Structures are given as structure tokens and as C-alpha cells.
Amino acid sequence: MKENWYILFALAEKQEQVCNVIRNQGLHAFLPMMEYYRRDRKAIEVKPMFPGYIFVRTLMQQQDFDQMLFSLGDQKHGLIRQLKREGSTAMRKFEIEFFRQLLTEDGISKMSYGYLQNKKAVITEGAIRPFQDKIVKVDRHNKIAWLDFEFMNRQIQSGLWLDQKYESQQTEENKDSRYKTSEMKIQNQISKMREV
């Protein structure tokens, strides 16, 4: 049986409560989160990717899922609605595959690491490594990347920590040695951040 992913919209102040009620039904419910760099604290923190939205992974078909939600009665206080498309809230197959790759089992998009080469981000580690060719915009200052993947009428964002800039005229030999240096610097930065 295939796993379906459903999307619920809840009041922001009630989203965790609604999520827990769904989990108590034995379903995998989570708030999709992303790691990002918080400049004022100089630290990597976590924030919602889609504030107010709850993802639910289950083998339930649409009708059974609807019935389960209805049976919750007052327990689901704060739930505004299911997001529905053509009578179904289940995510499309390509969306499920995208989020399976982007998010951990806990529903977190981990910070990615890399460097710029010829004005393009080269990802060496992290959530968006499989989507390196889908990066359309990078904000180096705030350490965020935008992907060419639209979901709920917005482009997906993910944390991206870029090391040093590579110039296009460098020789292949210089690129290789700088890449190794960049890898070492990134590993040192990761180690320092994990110690904090």
C-alpha cells in the first residue's frame, strides 16, 4: 500500500497541539522545519518552513483520513482546514519524493554547505545537495537558498552556508586544492557549530 501525505492548516498558536492530537491517532504528523543561520545570535536555529501547516504521512486513503479528522470532534480545536486539490489533499507523487529527499525523518531541512564556483552554488553537504541544479537564488548574507520548486504558491527556501568564492578563470589544479581547503574549513565550521 502506498503512503499518502496530507496537509492541514491550523492556527499558528495551536499547530503543535493539533499535531499532537493527530500523532495520538498513530499517524506520523509533523511541522516541516528548516535550519537557518540567525545572524543576531550567530547560530544555526530551526524555524517553520510553512508556518501553520502540518504534514501527515499515513497509509490511510482520503475518505478514511477525512473520517478520522471528523471523529476527533473538539480535540482538533485550532484546525482550520485540509488543503484540497481536486477533491484530494494527498500530495502528488513528485511532491512526496521532493520532501522525502529534503526533510529528515523528523521533518527538518538541515543546513546545507558549499561554495560558489562560476557564480553557481556547489553543494558539498546537506539537504539541498540533490537539488543543486535547482537553486535559483542565493542570499549569502542571510545564508538562504531558493529552489526552483514551487509548493503552496511559494518557492522552497533552505539554509545554505557558502564558504569562499571561486573565480571562473582558476585552473583545474587550483580548483582542486581550493576545494580540499574549502572542505576542511566547512568541516571545521560544522564541528564548531555542533560544539555550541
Image: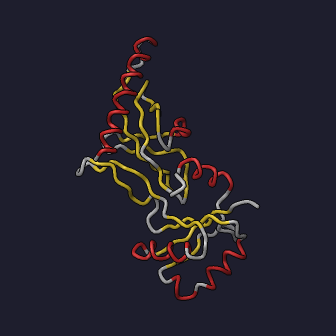
Question: What residue is shown at x 37% (from left), y 39% (from top)?
Answer: 161
Q: How many marks?
A: 0
Q: Is residue 98 above or below residue 133?
A: below
In the image, taking residue 100 as reference, residue 35 lies left or right, namely: left
Question: What residue is shown at x 65% (from left), y 79% (from top)?
Answer: 68
| Quadrant location, the N terminus | bottom right
The image position of residue 12, as x and y in percent, is 41, 72
The way the protein has been coloured in the rendering is secondary structure
Q: Residue furthest left?
A: 40
In the image, taking residue 88 as reference, residue 44 lies left or right, namely: left
The image position of residue 193, as x and y in percent, is 31, 43
Q: Residue furthest front?
A: 195
Q: Is residue 183 above or below residue 45?
A: above
Q: Quadrant of residue 192?
A: top left
Question: What residue is shown at x 24% (from left), y 51% (from top)?
Answer: 41
The image position of residue 170, as x and y in percent, is 40, 14
Q: Residue furthest bottom?
A: 74
Q: Is residue 67 above or below residue 26?
A: below
Q: Residue furthest right?
A: 1
Question: What residue is shown at x 54% (from left), y 48% (from top)?
Answer: 102
Q: Quadrant of residue 2?
A: bottom right
The image position of residue 165, as x and y in percent, is 35, 26
Q: Is residue 87 above or below residue 102?
A: below
